[in-house]
Amino acid sequence: MSLLHRIEHAGDALAWHGDMPTLGRYTAGIAGEKFFREIMENGKFLGTICPSCDLVYTPPRLYCEQCFAQLEEWVEVPTTGIVETFTIVHLDMDGNRLPEPRVMAFVHIDDTDGGFVHFLGDVEPEEICIGMPVEAVFKEPGERQGSILDIAHFRPR
Ligand SMILES: [Zn+2]
């Protein structure tokens, strides 16, 4: 296989399975910390506003991606949105068939200029369409750990 050979299937890629004896820690950053803490403690989403560009970022940003201004105005944003695109996943990262297909979607959060990828649930795959209104389903408060997975999934509303 040369460097120019295109891999068509993930299973064709040369993989080296094993454990690496390293430890690492990524932080969510200042904005991410505040975003995840609000989900964990209150089941709400936060965003930041750039008044110059009239943009609402969620997940929140500390700097505007358009004008590079520092963003200091925080706002609660809806936990609802629209399916902007989606895919149905049948295989895991190693190419093994999942027990049940999972639906992943990019959800554009209402009243904002942002959104994120998450699972769709409580819906049959053939019922999903681009533009479908959805709402976040949060895990029970005692089960939340301050991560994006504190949202169990989004479901139709
Ligand atoms: Zn801006």
Image (cartoon, rainbow, N blue to C red):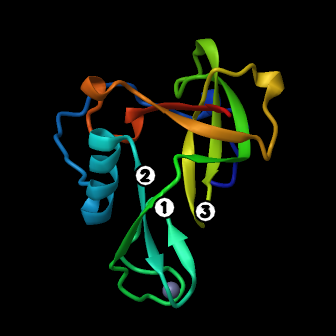
Sequence-wise, the earlier of marks 1 and 2 is: 2
Q: Amino acid at mark 1?
A: Thr
Which amino acid does the dot numbered 2 rest on? Phe
Indicate left or right for 40 with 126 as reference.
Answer: left
> Mark 1 or 3 closer to N-term?
1
SS type, badge 2: strand
Indicate yes or no: mark 1 CB to ligand 1 under 8 Å. Answer: no
For residue 11, what is the image quadrant?
top right
Which residue is depicted at the point 76% across and 41% down? 132
Q: Is label 2 within 8 A of ligand 1 (CB to nearest ligand atom)?
A: no
Q: State the image coordinates of residue 129 (x, y, percent, origin top left).
A: 82, 37
Which residue shows up at 83% across the image and 23% down it? 126
**The C terminus, quarter of image:** top right
Q: Is residue 58 visible?
A: yes
Q: Is residue 66 above or below residue 138?
A: below
Ranked by sequence position, the earlier of labels 3 and 2 is: 2
Res. 2 in view: no
- Asked if labels 2 and 1 touch by Cβ distance under 8 angstroms, the answer is yes
In what element is the residue under mark 1? Answer: loop
Residue that label 1 marks: 58
Q: Which residue is mark 3?
A: 111
56 over 105 or under it: above or below:
below
Q: CA distance from mark 1 to mark 2?
A: 8 Å
Front tag of 1 and 2: 2
Q: CA distance from mark 1 to mark 3?
A: 10 Å
Disc 3 crowd, CA 10 A, few/some/many (<14, 14-19, 20+): some
- Residue under label 2, please give it: 45
Q: Residues within 10 Å of mark 2 (few under 14, many from 20)?
A: many
